[in-house]
Amino acid sequence: MKALVISGGGSKGAFAGGVAEYLIKDLGRNYDLFLGTSTGSLLVPHLAANNVNKLYGIFTNVQQNDIFSVSPFIQRQKGDREYVSIDFVNSLWQFVRMKRTFGESKSLRRNIKRNLTREEFDKIRATKEDVVVTVSNLSMNRVEYKSINEFSYEEFCNWIWISCNYIPFMSLAKVDGYEYADGGLGCVIPIREAIQRGATEVDAIVLESENMSKQKVLGKNPFSLMLSLFGHLLDQVEKNDIMIGKLAAKNRGVKLNMYYTPTSLTENSLIFSKRLMTKWWSQGYEYAKNKHEDQVLE
């Protein structure tokens, strides 16, 4: 049973889309099992429904207001470069309203339901083994995996949304008395989960470069420093997930194919730029193509 696993990574999900396009459309990979965390959870249902072209349109046209109902960031452009700063007005307004997060992502929840139809949901359940998204149960301090086969259309769309909620910058969700957030807080790339669910071959797309050689610039104020700190912590979780996944694959004789970003794409993956995401999609496609062409030559 073949599995496609996609890590978290915010706007860098466009790169994963390009890789998946090459694997599915050009190489003809037919996956039975799809697992995703955060932005990966947005990708996997559409890939399971074989809607690569539709997914391209979604990921290369998304804007900040498609994600945030209250955005904690301000995006500015100077020449060819885009800069990000903190929206202190919105953040202060959240405190005044006694909210526990700096921003809200209710727009994303509406867009998930708009883009993933009930017909596509039914098609996936009828034709694929499983689609699984990762969430973090903060109340119970554990990672949970939500299967498309265990929930209704409305419930599964909600779990996709919850998997993407990178707190404290996005919404904190409550389900059945438990508080949930981004699955990446506990598992960035669920390779081992795919193997435990029966995968015998796994293609894993990791939205980070394999060897981090670039020096990161830390934030210049407490808010942006917090964002940098969260990024550092998630990098450590991701490395641990990859190590555990590789060990699980080796122990069970599972073929594991890893796809990393060739460079560090962005310092803030919560900023959504049409220009950059279109570029990253093309880079992902070319990266996967070159990787397989090099393997053939070897």
Image (spheres, rainbow, N blue to C red):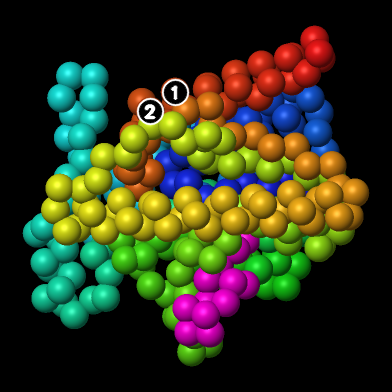
Q: Quadrant of the C terminus?
A: top right
- Three-letter amino acid code at the position of disc 1: Lys
Residue drawn at the location 18% of the way across and 80% of the way down: 98
Residue 224: percent from left, percent from top:
22, 52
Q: Decide if residue 113 is in sight here.
A: no
Our reading of the magenta stretch's main secondary structure is: strand
Front one among 231 and 96: 231
Residue drawn at the location 52% of the way across and 80% of the way down: 141
Assign a secondary structure to mark 1.
helix
Residue 209: percent from left, percent from top:
52, 35
Question: Which residue bears the numbered disc 1?
Answer: 279
Assign a secondary structure to mark 2.
helix
| Displayed quadrant of residue 100 | bottom left
159 lies above or below 278 = below
- Quick one: label 1, few (<14), some, or many (20+) residues within 10 Å? some
- Specify whether residue 137 is painted magenta: yes
- Three-letter amino acid code at the position of disc 2: Leu
166 lies above or below 5 = below
Q: Pointer 1 and pointer 2: residues touching (CB < 8 Å)?
A: yes
138 lies above or below 161 = below
Residue 245: percent from left, percent from top:
72, 53
Question: Which residue bears the numbered disc 2?
Answer: 276
Q: Which span is picked out in magenta?
A: 133-144
Residue drawn at the location 73% of the way across and 30% of the way down: 23
